[in-house]
Image (cartoon, rainbow, N blue to C red):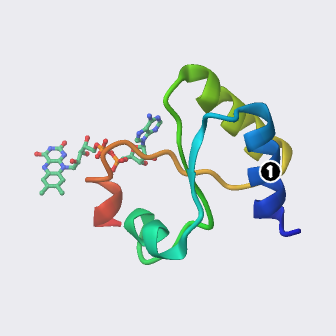
Amino acid sequence: MTEIESFATTLQHYSTAIRTISDPDELRNYAVDGMLPRFAIIPETVEQVSQAVALANQQGLTLITRGGGSRLNLG
Ligand SMILES: Cc1cc2nc3c(=O)[nH]c(=O)nc-3n(C[C@H](O)[C@H](O)[C@H](O)COP(=O)(O)OP(=O)(O)OC[C@H]3O[C@@H](n4cnc5c(N)ncnc54)[C@H](O)[C@@H]3O)c2cc1C
């Protein structure tokens, strides 16, 4: 199991309703400077944000926050 698969599985365990994206074609919409994220999370509650951030920290994963993406799309 890759670290992203392990992250995804644990996250779903903590927060069954959290929306996530792992499909490479969909992840292209979240690229920054052509760098493709390996995974995207679309949290809808403060609790989901805090669970995702805490778990990413625990697993030493880099996390980029995104709002409308209008600035990140500039690179
Ligand atoms: C055509 C165009 C015109 C623009 N005109 C202007 C302008 O006139 N004035 C201006 O100031 N800017 C302008 N911008 C830049 C941009 O739109 C603004 O900076 C805007 O505030 C970015 O908001 P966003 O939600 O799209 O941020 P994003 O692009 O999603 O993110 C921008 C930064 O904020 C961080 N971030 C986003 N959401 C969060 C969060 N919830 N918590 C912590 N960090 C977060 C991201 O990690 C990233 O570092 C323009 C951009 C474009 C494409």
Residue at 63% x, 22% y: name it: 47
Label 1: how many Cα within 10 Å (few below 14, some 14–19, many 20+)? some
Q: Position of residue 34 (x, y in %)?
A: 43, 78
On the picture, is 26 further left or further right than 47? Answer: left
- Find out if the beta carbon at label 1 lies less than 8 Å from the nearest ligand 1 atom: no
Q: Position of residue 24 (x, y in %)?
A: 53, 74
Q: Position of residue 3 (x, y in %)?
A: 83, 63
Residue at 84% x, 50% y: name it: 59
For label 1, the SS is helix
Q: Quadrant of residue 26?
A: bottom left
Q: Position of residue 28 (x, y in %)?
A: 43, 72
Residue at 57% x, 50% y: name it: 20
Q: Quadrant of the N terminus?
A: bottom right
Q: Nearer the viewer, residue 57 or 44?
A: 44
Task: Give ligand 1's quarter of the image.
Answer: top left
Q: In the rendered image, which residue does mark 1 sit on?
A: 9
Residue at 54% x, 51% y: name it: 64
Residue occupying the far right of the picture: 1
